[in-house]
Image: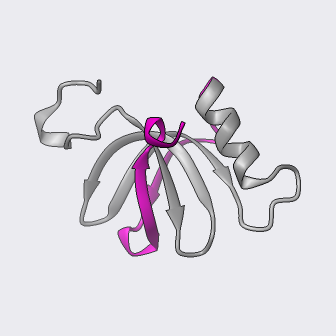
């Protein structure tokens, strides 16, 4: 259950997974969505072509232990978002 800020939307405070049209995968806490895009907090990123671990390994680790934040806050333009889901839906 997320925090209770009615003006922030139903996903506020929920850990989400965002796949971008460029092939990157981001996992972080959803803060808000406005005309600038999505604001995520405490974000971990798996870049397309990352050779350290597969995307499946990245998502599996985040679903078990939570994301390991690389960015305290990240604004992602809505036009770059391919999919947006709760991390719990795939864990």
Q: Is residue 68 at all visible to an observer of this figure? A: no
Residue located 44% across and 56% down the image: 75
Residue 70: in sight, yes or no?
yes
Residue 12's place in the image compared with 85, above or below, is above
**Is 49 above or below relative to 16?**
below
Instruction: State the residue at coordinates (41%, 50%).
Output: 85
Residue at position x 44%, y 67% from top? 81
Q: Is residue 25 left or right of residue 78?
A: right
- Closest to the observer, 91 or 83: 91
The reply to whether the magenta stretch includes residue 19 is no
Q: Looking at the picture, how far across and down is residue 70, in whole percent?
A: 66, 41
- Closest to the observer, 7 or 10: 10
Residue 82 image-quadrant placement: bottom left
Name the residue rendered at 79%, 67% in the picture: 49
Segment colored magenta = 65-91
- Which quadrant does the N terminus fall into? top left
Residue 4 place in picture, x, y as percent: 18, 25
Which quarter of the image is occupied by the C terminus?
A: top right
Furthest residue to the front? 90
Tell me residue 58's x, y (percent). Answer: 71, 44
Instruction: Give the number of callouts.
Output: 0
Q: Is residue 74 above or below residue 48?
A: above
Q: Quadrant of residue 46?
A: bottom right
Q: Is residue 80 left or right of residue 72?
A: left
């Amino acid at each position: 259950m997320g925090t209770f800020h009615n003006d922030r939307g139903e996903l506020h405070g929920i850990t989400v997974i965002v796949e971008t049209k460029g092939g990157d995968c981001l996992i972080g806490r959803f803060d808000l969505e406005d005309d600038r895009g999505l604001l995520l907090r405490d974000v971990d990123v798996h870049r397309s072509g990352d050779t350290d671990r597969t995307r499946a390994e990245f998502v599996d680790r985040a679903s078990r232990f939570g994301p390991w934040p690389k960015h305290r806050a990240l604004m992602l333009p809505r036009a770059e978002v391919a999919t947006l889901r709760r991390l719990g839906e795939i864990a």
